[in-house]
Image: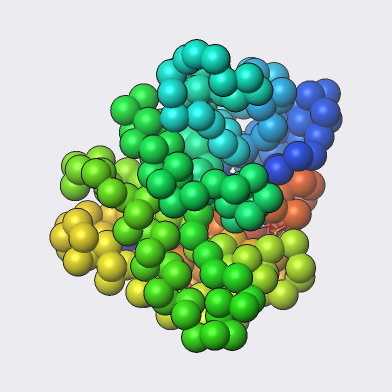
Amino acid sequence: MTRKKLIAGNWKMNKTATDAVALAHDIVVALGSQQEVEVVVCPPFTSLEGVGKAIEGSVVKLGAQNMHFEASGAFTGEISAPMLRALFATHVILGHSERRTLFGESDELVNKKVLAALRNQLRPIVCVGESLAEREAGSTLKVIQTQTERALEGVSKELAAGIVIAYEPVWAIGTGKVATTEQAQEVHGFIRGLLTKLMGEGVSQRVRILYGGSMKPANAPELLAQKDIDGGLIGGASLEARSFLELVKAAASVC
Ligand code: 13P
């Protein structure tokens, strides 16, 4: 089965609202009407509205980088799924390793967020990944299994197919150290097998599994050609229109 490739830009805590709109505009112009690859940009909350307007009518979709699992209430500094929907966001990154390690997000919290996103028709991009110590200890697949199983607890088979999983080895994020294609494909294949066990073959063949961690135009073609790598979640290289577009082209070339 052919899954549409997905290239998502995680802008992290970068760009003022003005700079974000300018980048979104450049991406929209350069992409034109290409349909081969699904493209999502995830700016900071402060830029969601402006970027949403800049991409209106284009092929680019809007994602957030995080959200709270409650719809509203006394949660100072938080943003809810209905608030994201009201700005026409369609995707939300959940459980990014920076949220897990710097902000103490647990598997249980990530799961609550996944369920809340699905309740609100937002497509979660659920991040999983091992640390360097975990890889060196030989526990990569165990860590990935636990994070994936816990994130998907209580998710119905019908909704599971719409989830996107991003495999981001923590040691490859922002370090310039990319996983080898063999290392990445091994974990992606493992996640696909796990999804088959949990949700059935029909669902697992539809879920897109993205690679994230120092993906750049130079290493993307080889990674994206792997059978279980369905796209990329891009940090640094998504902050400039030119490199982001090269990644979209790389994904299009292996479609
Ligand atoms: P880099 O592409 O900067 O390594 O970041 C990857 C990432 O964390 C995307 O979510």
- Most foreground residue, 5 or 100: 100
Q: Is residue 182 above or below residue 6?
A: below
- In the rendered structure, the answer to whether residue 196 lies left or right of residue 92 reads left
Q: Residue at x 63, y 19 (%)?
A: 76
Q: Residue at x 45, y 42 (%)?
A: 109
- In the rendered structure, the answer to whether residue 56 lies left or right of residue 198 reads right
Quadrant of the frame with the C terminus = bottom left
Picture coordinates of residue 55, whole percent (x, y): 62, 26
Number of numbered markers: 0
Q: Is residue 46 above or below residue 108?
A: above
- In the rendered structure, the answer to whether residue 1 lies left or right of residue 9 reads left
Q: Is residue 80 above or below residue 193?
A: above
- In the rendered structure, the answer to whether residue 222 lies left or right of residue 115 reads right
Query: Can you tell which quarter of the image residue 223 is in?
Result: bottom right
Picture coordinates of residue 71, whole percent (x, y): 43, 18
Query: Can you tell which quarter of the image residue 47 is in?
Result: top right
- Color theme of the render: rainbow
Picture coordinates of residue 17, whole percent (x, y): 79, 24
Residue 52 visible in the displayed image: no
Q: Residue at x 76, y 70 (%)?
A: 176
Picture coordinates of residue 1, whole percent (x, y): 26, 62
Residue 166 visible in the displayed image: yes
- Most foreground residue, 189 or 66: 66
Ligand 1 sits in which quadrant?
Answer: bottom right
Q: Is residue 175 above or below residue 20?
A: below
Q: Residue at x 38, y 59 (%)?
A: 148
